Image (cartoon, grey):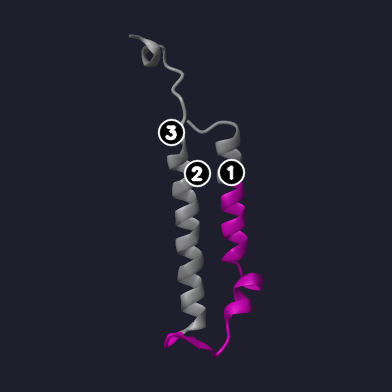
């Protein structure tokens, strides 16, 4: 299914997401600040979450443009 660089990117994305959503880095956003009337902490939490989903989609859907190695792809 996923081999080589795609698998490495998914593993790196997992550990990056785990680090970003874990206590030490997530505590950086825990302040009494408002952005556009919204508290900073939930805004940052959902922003990081949305960014992780977007990068995941980019990694997984990036395979759709890759050339196929099936023998039927080159028949005329």
**In the image shown, does 47 or 23 lie closer to the viewer?**
47
Crowd tier of the residue under label 2, counting other residues whose Cα lies within 10 Å: few below 14, some 14–19, many 20 or above: some
Which residue is the extreme one toward the bottom?
Answer: 32
Q: Residue at x 49, y 60 (%)?
A: 51
- Report the span colored magenta: 11-38
Which residue is the extreme one toward the top?
Answer: 76
For the residues carrying marks 1 and 3, which lies nearer the camera in this image?
Answer: 3
Circle on res. 59: 2
Q: Is residue 24 above or below residue 12?
A: below
Whether the residues at callouts 2 and 3 have beta carbons within 8 Å, the answer is no
| Residue 14 part of the magenta segment | yes
Q: Mark 3 sits on what residue?
A: 65
x, y (%) of residue 75? 36, 9
Q: Residue at x 51, y 82 (%)?
A: 40
For the residues carrying marks 2 and 3, which lies nearer the camera in this image?
Answer: 3
32 relative to 63 in the view: left or right: right
Q: Residue at x 43, y 85 (%)?
A: 36
Which residue is the extreme one toward the right?
Answer: 24
Q: Is residue 69 above or below residue 23?
A: above
Q: Separation of disc 2 and disc 3 at Cα? A: 11 Å
Whether the residues at callouts 1 and 3 have beta carbons within 8 Å, the answer is no
Crowd tier of the residue under label 3, counting other residues whose Cα lies within 10 Å: few below 14, some 14–19, many 20 or above: few
Q: Separation of disc 1 and disc 2 at Cα? A: 7 Å
Ranked by sequence position, the earlier of labels 1 and 3 is 1
Callout 1: helix, strand or loop?
helix
Ranked by sequence position, the earlier of labels 1 and 2 is 1
Circle on res. 9: 1
């Amino acid at each position: 299914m996923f081999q080589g660089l795609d698998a490495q990117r998914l593993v790196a994305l997992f550990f990056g997401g785990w680090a970003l959503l874990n206590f030490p880095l997530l505590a950086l956003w825990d302040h009494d600040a408002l952005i556009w009337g919204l508290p900073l902490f939930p805004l940052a939490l959902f922003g990081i979450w949305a960014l992780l989903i977007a990068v995941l989609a980019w990694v997984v859907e990036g395979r759709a443009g890759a050339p196929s190695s099936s023998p039927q792809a080159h028949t005329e």
